[in-house]
Amino acid sequence: MSMTSLTEYAVTAFYKFLPLDADRLPQLRDNMEEWGKANGLIGLLIFAREGCNGTVAGAPETISQFKSFLTELLKTPDIDFKDSVSKRRPFRRLAVQLRREAVTAGREGAVDEAQRRALSPEEWHSLLESGEDVLLIDTRNAYETEIGKFRGAIDPQIEKFTEFKEFIEQAGLPKDKKVLIYCTGGIRCEKAIVDVMNAGYQDVFQLSGGILKYLEKFPNAHYEGECFVFDNRVAVRQDLTPSETYHLCPHCGQPGKEKISCLRCGDEGIICARCAEQSKLTCSKDCNYQLNFQREKKARRERARAALQGA
Ligand SMILES: [Zn+2]
Ligand SMILES: [Zn+2]
């Protein structure tokens, strides 16, 4: 089935922690890959011994069939899918991968069901509405919090999720307060909550389904800005439609919104603030390379000329 004709892609993000037998993983991957290719599915799916994680896109009917297929494949009835849409093709192709972890935290395993304390978007919302004095902690990376977060949330300023554990161990926040943690779709909190509890915080809750599920129910409320997502949309707005502000910076791959006129080719481009500060005022890696090459050549010529004149 050709995907090029789609005017709108259905996108769904999901994860499920459940023990998957290592011997079974290659078969799961092959089955998923085969079904996906036959049905025009694109996106990224990860299978690990601790479970699966992914975001996929396709025609709306493909995505609803995919949900049944995955549910049957994993033999688990309660996978929570977070849906959104995209007018642009959100992924180039389908990738089904086997990894050590479904989400990389540096250790396998999530919070176990007995310890897990999750708030539904409704419970989360009314707690924030109540004005209760809580510690609201974002578990995402700095390039994600930069473009949007819950009002008043503590931003750990981490570069990758594996740094969260160290952050919470050293944060020195009051341990008697209620702690609320959240991430994009909920998966990182399944691991982060273990770190927060191990660091001695007593009363810890995670946002079930993450920001994406919250925005589905409560746009323009306690979450401010846009929400970074891991596909070509870069970010989604409050109504879960793709960002029109942010693009992936061609130089470093992080979200950016600085409009520039390329110093080499003159085309308009969008880069991130950090690369703009470093004067990478070009529309692409290639233009940046060519521009530096020209500059070096010119500098060499000038040095040679100066040397001749000095002789
Ligand atoms: Zn950049
Ligand atoms: Zn250019």
Image: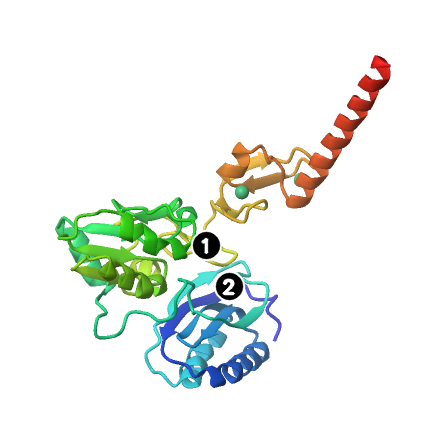
Classify 151 as above or below 112.
above
Name the image quarter holding residue 276: top right
Percent position of residue 237, x then y: 39, 52
Q: List the residue tagged with mark 2.
A: 8
Q: Which colour scheme is used?
A: rainbow
Classify 242 as above or below 81.
above
Classify 21 as above or below 165.
below
Name the image quarter holding residue 308: top right
Other residues around mark 2 within 10 Å, as few (<14) / some (14–19) / many (≥20): some
Q: Residue at x 67, y 35 (%)?
A: 266
Which amino acid does the dot numbered 2 rest on? Glu
Q: Is mark 2 on a helix, strand or loop?
A: loop
Q: Is mark 1 on a helix, strand or loop?
A: loop
Which amino acid does the dot numbered 1 rest on? Pro
Q: List the residue tagged with mark 1.
A: 242
Label located before the other in sequence (2 or 1): 2
Extreme-top residue of the structure: 310
Other residues around mark 1 within 10 Å, as few (<14) / some (14–19) / many (≥20): many
Percent position of residue 101, x then y: 43, 69
* Residue 8 shows in the view: yes
Q: Residue at x 58, y 80 (%)?
A: 38
- Between residue 108 and residue 229, name the one nearer to us: 108
For the N terminus, the image quarter is bottom right
